Image (cartoon, rainbow, N blue to C red):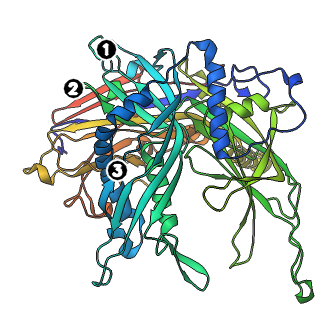
């Protein structure tokens, strides 16, 4: 197969965390152990905005002693440069938002495009700026340019109260008339992290920058022409079919999450010919294991029409929790209970964190409804940063009780406190690069190894012991339910670029790459992710990392599964018309990388073929005993 005369496919990176966790009552530098100063009441977490503000204050106090410097002149620079930023930002918004309209909007609304796009004369304001000391990249072996492995990191609050002029319009609906509306104001606030990497000894000493919001920013849109439409909901029988305002708002949130909220960074080279592998800086620092313990204060909903057989509704409580923009984890449901309790050893989830103090946990409590036409009711919501949990945790289990809020239903209003509480605990587990001995421990201590050893012994012994076999199966089930779902590492593949794609016309070279575990036709083949579509380029710059958590069950599977299911495949796809649905893309072939090539003794390997160059470099981080 020779679909590329020279393709640089990527870097494989495996990370594993150390076992010395920093739990709520541990000795981490994020944790203040002087609990005598704390009162018996949980801190009031007023709203998501308040939580964002609190994390900023926490950062400042935490970093005063570590050499962080406060500077605040950039707002003036932004103000002077705003006419240029407006034009550059306008094009970026157009390029990123319009494709999302096509993907996410239903029916006739999918043709929505910008008729006018002006971000206005009000510039961004930057505040609470922190410049940190130089960091050393822990993945030094991944860099191509060994000269500069240090990078500069700083954060600031971004506040924007825009008076913009944005006009949007669809194609003609049913060939009659288009639907048009506008946005006259955008309010945005959030904390932005900026990384300057790589550094060099040639002015301006920074070869590239990358940036992302630490948490999803708060965004409000002021529609015009839509009192008529954007505030309108198309209903049939009381069911919302199209909530235009809600959909547009969801699109904005989705675009920000995919490109501008950690772990997703946007980068911009400042020098020519900068290799993306030098620009790349790992987004994930470790994992936060969140345990769900209990709740209290939930109320019985009194029946409105008892004379018609109505009954009081005792809440069936479950929780949904996420960190940053990760997927929500859903707990089990405790039936008919106003003070639900969960088994914290089983009710937990591992979240990968990018910022060990500032990232915010979103906690939602819900009442499950079993009726076919009844929706589950949200009982309350809370936002708390990792740093706040570490500081305020108490007791032998390092727990924190968090007050739930009733979310405001309209913009401009604040969330209101409830008398409902959820108790959680949190462990911080850091990535390290020491050794792989703990990986062997996972395999040796698992019941799967015990079962295999017993099978080998049984082959030499004619006696069968069904009781032992049932016991082993029970152990495996229990292990898979608890220990098997624990995250023990991170696999990151960096796809940099391809060169000299074999197209006659460059305009036809619309390509992207999918990454798979398992070869084509394998029963266990799993898609890990794909690059964005790069249009009209014979030398496409994909420049994207694809990260997947590795669970303990994956480690066991790797020891007992078909070797073909462990091969990493890079499949190149071609789309004839870049406006077409991505599902119409055709495969041009794939590159296969074996585990042996990734995990060799030196931690890196290079595989070369005449028509193909694949560079795989790995850094192994593991549990530290």
> Quick check: marks 2 and 1 in contact, CB under 8 Å?
no
Q: Position of residue 299 (x, y in %)?
A: 87, 62
Q: Position of residue 425 (x, y in %)?
A: 77, 37
> Quick check: marks 3 and 2 in contact, CB under 8 Å?
no
Q: Residues within 10 Å of mark 3 (few under 14, many from 20)?
A: some
Residue underneath mark 1: 200
Q: CA distance from mark 1 to mark 3?
A: 31 Å
Return the disc, 3 or 2, that comes first in the chain's sequence: 3
Q: Quadrant of the C terminus?
A: top right
**Residue closest to the eye, 234 or 324:** 234
Q: Is residue 510 visible?
A: yes
Position of 140 relative to 542 (above/below): above
Residue underneath mark 2: 272
Toward which corner of the image does residue 121 lie, by quadrant?
A: top left
Residue underneath mark 3: 93
Relative horizontal placement of residue 545, taking residue 496 as reference (left or right): right
Q: Residues within 10 Å of mark 1 (few under 14, many from 20)?
A: some
Position of 188 relative to 145 (above/below): below
**Residue closest to the eye, 175 or 487:** 175
Q: Residue furthest right?
A: 307
Q: Position of residue 552 (x, y in %)?
A: 61, 38
Position of 356 relative to 161 (above/below): above
Label annotation for residue 476? none
Disc 1 secondary structure class: loop
Q: Which mark is in front, 1 or 3?
A: 3
Q: Residue furthest left?
A: 504
């Amino acid at each position: 197969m020779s679909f590329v005369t020279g393709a640089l496919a990527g870097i494989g990176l495996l990370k594993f965390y150390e076992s010395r966790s920093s739990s709520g009552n541990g000795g981490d530098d994020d944790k203040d152990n002087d609990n005598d100063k704390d009162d018996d009441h949980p801190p009031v977490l007023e709203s998501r905005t308040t939580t964002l503000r609190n994390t900023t204050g926490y950062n400042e106090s935490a970093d005063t002693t570590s050499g962080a410097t406060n500077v605040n002149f950039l707002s003036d620079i932004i103000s002077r440069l705003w006419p240029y930023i407006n034009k550059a930002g306008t094009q970026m918004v157009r390029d990123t938002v319009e494709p999302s309209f096509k993907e996410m909007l239903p029916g006739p609304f999918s043709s929505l495009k910008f008729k006018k796009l002006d971000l206005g004369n009000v510039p961004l304001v930057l505040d609470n700026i922190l410049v940190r000391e130089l960091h050393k990249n822990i993945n030094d072996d991944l860099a191509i340019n060994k000269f500069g492995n240090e990078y500069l990191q700083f954060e600031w609050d971004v506040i924007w109260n825009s008076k913009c002029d944005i006009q949007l319009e669809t194609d003609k609906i049913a060939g009659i008339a288009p639907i048009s509306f506008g946005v006259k104001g955008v309010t945005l606030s959030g904390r932005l992290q900026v990384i300057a990497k790589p550094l060099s000894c040639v002015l301006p000493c920074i070869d590239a920058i990358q940036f992302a919001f630490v948490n999803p920013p708060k965004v409000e849109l002021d529609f015009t022409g839509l009192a008529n439409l954007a505030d309108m909901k198309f209903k049939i029988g009381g069911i919302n079919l199209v909530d235009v305002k809600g959909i547009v708002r969801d699109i904005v949130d989705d675009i920000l999450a995919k490109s501008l909220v950690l772990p997703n960074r946007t980068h911009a080279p400042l020098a020519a010919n900068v290799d993306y592998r030098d620009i790349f800086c790992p987004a994930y620092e470790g994992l936060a294991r969140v345990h769900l313990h209990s709740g209290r204060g939930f109320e019985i909903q009194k029946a409105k029409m008892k004379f018609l057989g109505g009954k009081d509704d005792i809440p069936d409580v479950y929780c949904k929790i996420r960190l940053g923009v990760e997927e929500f984890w859903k707990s089990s449901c405790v039936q008919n209970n106003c003070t639900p309790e969960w088994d914290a050893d089983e009710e937990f989830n591992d979240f990968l964190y990018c910022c060990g103090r500032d990232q915010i946990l979103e906690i939602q409590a819900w009442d499950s409804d079993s009726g076919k036409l009844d929706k589950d009711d949200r009982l309350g919501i809370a936002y708390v940063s990792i740093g706040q949990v570490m500081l305020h945790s108490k007791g032998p289990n390092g727990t924190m009780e968090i007050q739930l809020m009733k979310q405001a239903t309209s913009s401009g209003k604040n969330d209101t406190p409830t008398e409902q509480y959820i108790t959680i605990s949190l462990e911080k587990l850091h990535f390290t690069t020491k050794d792989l001995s703990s990986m062997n421990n996972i395999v040796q201590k698992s019941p799967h190894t015990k079962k295999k050893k017993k099978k080998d012994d049984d082959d030499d012994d004619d006696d069968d012991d069904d009781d032992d076999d049932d016991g082993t199966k029970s152990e495996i089930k229990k292990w898979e339910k608890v220990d098997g779902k624990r995250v023990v590492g991170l696999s990151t593949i960096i796809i940099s670029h391809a060169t000299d794609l074999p197209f006659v016309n460059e305009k036809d070279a619309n390509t992207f790459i999918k990454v798979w575990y398992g070869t084509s036709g394998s029963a266990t083949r799993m898609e890990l992710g794909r690059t964005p579509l790069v249009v009209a380029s014979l030398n496409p710059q994909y420049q994207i990392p694809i990260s997947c958590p590795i669970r303990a069950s994956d480690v066991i599977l790797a020891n007992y599964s078909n070797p073909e299911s462990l091969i990493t495949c890079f499949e190149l796809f071609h789309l004839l018309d870049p406006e077409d649905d991505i599902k119409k893309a055709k495969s041009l072939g794939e590159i296969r990388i074996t585990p042996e090539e990734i995990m060799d003794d030196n931690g890196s390997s290079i595989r070369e073929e005449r028509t193909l160059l694949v560079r795989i470099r790995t850094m192994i981080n593991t549990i530290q005993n």
